[in-house]
Image (tube, coloured by chain):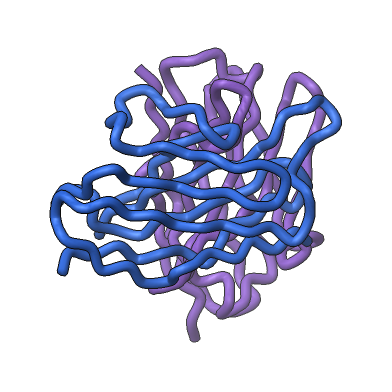
Chain colours: A blue, B purple
């Protein structure tokens, strides 16, 4: 199975400051169709997960533009340009290239 | 507007069975990939199974293969997860999710809680 390793696992951030989460894959996530199926999800406390980013860098509808995704092959990053209070929660990367699709362990973002 | 509503969770004894349902609305149900994803209490996310009815594609995580069966009923816009021979480690919130924009799990339901305990 593809193993996704996120770092850090805990990320205390000051309001208004940037934040960055890394996701490294044990295998290339480039699919035979040329797409890279790497997504990012946000799970706020007590809520269902919500997809923020798909195919590495495409923002889902309604997602603030302070969220951005980048990377290629096996190394990916989610960045929040200026953290707001509503960004508190756990962030997961996930791959949909090779079954079984897998998630990273999650990164807990909290306000300092 | 896409809506996914899970039901059918509850308390069941080890070795028992449960059938989860996911009622969908707001999209053409049979065209899309649909998934069941679970989250054990205080833990991370695990993909359990996915299905694309139109393409006849189904797969399962090794942890549930042979015990769980995913299915869809397009006439009722519903997806199901038949869970047999349940174990304590199957205790989790179970979410249904729909792919969109050519990528996995763009829409999620609110989840239904399954507890396996004697």
Q: Is residue A48 above or below residue B64?
A: above
Q: Which residue is drawn at 74% across and 59% down?
A: A2
- Could you tell me residue A59's position as x and y percent? 43, 28
Report if residue A111 is visible in the image: yes
Residue nearest the observer in this picture, A29 or B15: A29
Res A31 quadrant in image? top right
Percent coordinates x, y for residue B114 in the rendering: 46, 64
Give the residue at the far right of this rendering: A32
Name the spot of residue B112 as percent of width and height, x first: 40, 53
Decide if residue B36 is on the left or right side of residue B62: left
Q: Looking at the picture, tell me which residue is in the foreground, B12 or A77.
A: A77
Tally of numbered tags: 0
Is B17 displayed left or right of A30 in the figure?
left
Q: Can residue B41 be seen in this view?
A: no
Residue appearing at x 42%, y 27% in the figure = A60
Query: Which residue is found at the position 70% from the left and 51% from the top?
Result: A74
Image point 37% across, 49% down: which residue?
A: A42
- A58 above or below A90? above
Residue B117 at what x, y percent from top left?
48, 81
Q: Toward which corner of the image does residue B102 lie, by quadrant?
A: top right
Which image quadrant: the N terminus of chain B?
A: top left
């Amino acid at each position: 199975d593809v193993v996704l390793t996120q770092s850090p696992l805990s990320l205390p951030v000051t309001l208004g400051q940037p934040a960055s989460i890394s996701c490294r894959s044990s295998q290339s996530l480039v699919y035979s169709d040329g797409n890279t199926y790497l997504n990012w999800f946000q799970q706020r406390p007590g809520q269902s997960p919500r997809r923020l980013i798909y195919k590495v860098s495409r923002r889902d509808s309604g997602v603030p533009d302070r969220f951005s995704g980048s990377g290629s092959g096996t190394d990916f990053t989610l960045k929040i340009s200026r953290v707001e209070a509503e960004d508190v929660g756990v962030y997961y990367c996930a791959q949909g290239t090779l079954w079984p699709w897998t998630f990273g362990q999650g990164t807990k973002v909290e306000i300092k | 507007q896409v809506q996914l509503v899970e039901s059918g969770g509850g308390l069941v004894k080890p070795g028992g069975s449960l059938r989860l349902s996911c009622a969908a609305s707001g999209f053409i149900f049979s065209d899309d990939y649909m998934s069941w994803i679970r989250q054990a209490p205080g833990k991370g996310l695990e993909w359990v199974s996915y299905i694309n009815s139109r393409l006849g594609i189904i797969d399962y995580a090794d942890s549930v293969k042979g015990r769980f069966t995913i299915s869809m009923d397009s006439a009722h816009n519903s997806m199901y997860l038949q869970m047999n021979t349940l174990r304590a480690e199957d205790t989790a919130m179970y979410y249904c999710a729909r792919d969109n924009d050519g990528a996995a799990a763009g829409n999620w339901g609110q989840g239904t809680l399954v507890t396996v305990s004697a």
